[in-house]
Image: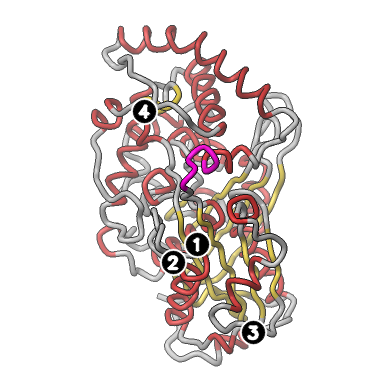
């Protein structure tokens, strides 16, 4: 198989873009990636395009990639459309990587986009529920809210005794995934003693990082106390602990060694491995998808968690980041709370995590999220991230989960990248 490199990335700022279309967002991201790579759109030999929800949001199905690329003059090349929930564009990245590894082209485009802000807020929130098993989603939501009612009072009483908890009013309508994450967070609290303040420490860290990221949807730093005082979404998760609805696009240009020879002044980032997995039915105490898949990724890359310098994970909520840290092997299972609260994941810490601000602050336009993570890691490895730069970063890792099947994600993609040269 051919070695594959990322030679350019680009993305829009994530946020509320009512005046933009999916075509205009894609054009901005792809143009930036092509310029970053130092190539022309005519050099792109194939494209893999990730999107999750435009079929529901706009009715555009089947040829989403062809539609957005044709609008900016890219045609007559193979275009592979990828739909895989929140992991859609990370999976598209894998498709592009495989095409080049097989020697089918010198350059490939991995693209993700999503436009999720709708005038109908209820419909906008329902997009997330579409990434769950529709035969069980309503029953699950009923169970999750019953669990919240039975456990919240007990957990809050314990934390209030320790000077941490406080009752808050609920926000109102929310996506089913917030109930899912909140229930998992409460179970973690009950089993391991994790506290709401530790989730707030994760969220505060991400909001601190996002103030230095011009592409982030939210760029306002928040203290732990401000995160705790914010409106409650679903106990123990307050609003800043949860990723917002957003619009955006992200793109990456991949190249083979033959492609690299055509470039001048390239700063390539090597793709060490890409691993894709799906959820399964399992006992709650068995290794989850992140644990299983990361071990495969480490083995394929010839690396371990101790080799990773910078990490982007799928923190759809603060609990998502905590669980990813445990599952990926950066701390022991059950210790993600104190590990994070101690500052290990901050800039300058043991394993800087989500220097972009993560999904909680950078935003989560679902189809763009996976390649958006790749953009951040490539910029980090090339030393191009300014005040949020992780000094000396050589190995970077992305973990991007999507949808839900039973007790874990329906899909997950792990990407490990390496800086080439000094």
User: In front: mark 2 or mark 1?
Assistant: 2
* Residue for badge 2: 11
Q: Quadrant of residue 282?
A: top right
Identify the residue under disc 4: 198
Residue 414 locus on image (x, y percent): 60, 53
Residue 339 left/right relative to 333: left
For residue 122: magenta? yes
Query: Pointer 3: residues within 10 angstroms few (<14), some, or many (20+)?
Result: many
| Point 34% across, 58% down: residue | 390
- Of labels 1 and 3, earlier in sequence is 3
- Secondary structure under the numbered disc 4 in the rendered image: helix
Q: Nearer the viewer, residue 244 or 159?
A: 244
Residue drawn at (48%, 80%), measured in percent from left and top?
34
SS under mark 3: loop
| Magenta range | 119-124
Q: Is residue 236 above or below residue 261?
A: above
Nearer the observer, 31 or 135: 135
Instruction: Name the residue that disc number 3 marks.
Output: 106
């Amino acid at each position: 198989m051919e070695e594959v490199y990322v030679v350019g990335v680009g993305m829009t700022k994530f946020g509320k873009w009512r005046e933009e279309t999916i075509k205009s967002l894609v054009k901005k991201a792809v143009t930036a990636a092509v310029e970053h790579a130092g190539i022309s759109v005519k050099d792109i030999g194939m494209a893999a395009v990730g999107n999750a929800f435009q079929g529901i949001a706009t009715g555009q199905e089947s040829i989403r990639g062809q539609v957005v690329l044709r609008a900016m003059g890219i045609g007559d090349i193979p275009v592979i459309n990828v739909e895989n929930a929140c992991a859609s564009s990370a999976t598209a990245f894998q498709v592009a990587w495989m095409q080049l590894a097989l020697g089918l082209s010198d350059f490939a485009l991995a693209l993700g986009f999503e436009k999720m802000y709708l005038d109908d807020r209820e419909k906008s929130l329902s997009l997330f529920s579409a990434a769950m098993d529709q035969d069980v989603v309503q029953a699950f939501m009923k169970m999750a809210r019953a669990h919240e009612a039975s456990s919240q009072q007990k957990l809050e009483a314990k934390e209030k005794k320790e000077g941490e908890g406080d009752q808050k009013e609920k926000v109102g309508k929310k996506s089913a995934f917030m109930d899912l994450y909140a229930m998992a967070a409460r179970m973690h609290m009950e089993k391991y003693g994790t506290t709401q303040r530790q989730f707030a420490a994760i969220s505060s860290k991400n909001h601190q990082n996002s103030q230095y990221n011009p592409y982030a949807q939210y760029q306002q730093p928040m203290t732990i106390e401000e995160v705790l005082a914010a409106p409650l979404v679903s106990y123990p998760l307050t609003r800043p602990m949860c990723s917002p609805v957003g619009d955006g696009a992200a793109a990456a240009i991949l190249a083979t060694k033959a492609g690299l020879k055509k470039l001048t002044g390239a700063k390539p980032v090597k793709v060490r491995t890409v691993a894709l997995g799906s959820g399964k039915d399992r006992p709650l105490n068995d290794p989850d998808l992140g644990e299983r898949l990361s071990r495969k990724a480490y083995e394929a890359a010839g690396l371990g968690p101790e080799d990773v310098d910078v990490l982007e994970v799928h923190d759809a909520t603060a609990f998502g980041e905590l669980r990813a840290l445990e599952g990926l092997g950066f701390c022991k299972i059950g210790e993600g709370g104190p590990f994070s609260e101690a500052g290990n994941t901050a800039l300058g810490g043991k394993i800087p995590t989500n220097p972009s601000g993560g999904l909680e602050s950078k935003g989560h336009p679902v189809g763009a999220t996976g390649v958006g993570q790749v953009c951040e890691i490539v910029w980090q490895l090339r030393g191009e991230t300014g005040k949020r730069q992780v000094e000396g970063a050589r190995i970077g890792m992305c973990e991007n989960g999507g949808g839900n099947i039973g007790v874990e994600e329906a899909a997950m993609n792990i990407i490990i990248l390496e800086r080439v040269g000094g």
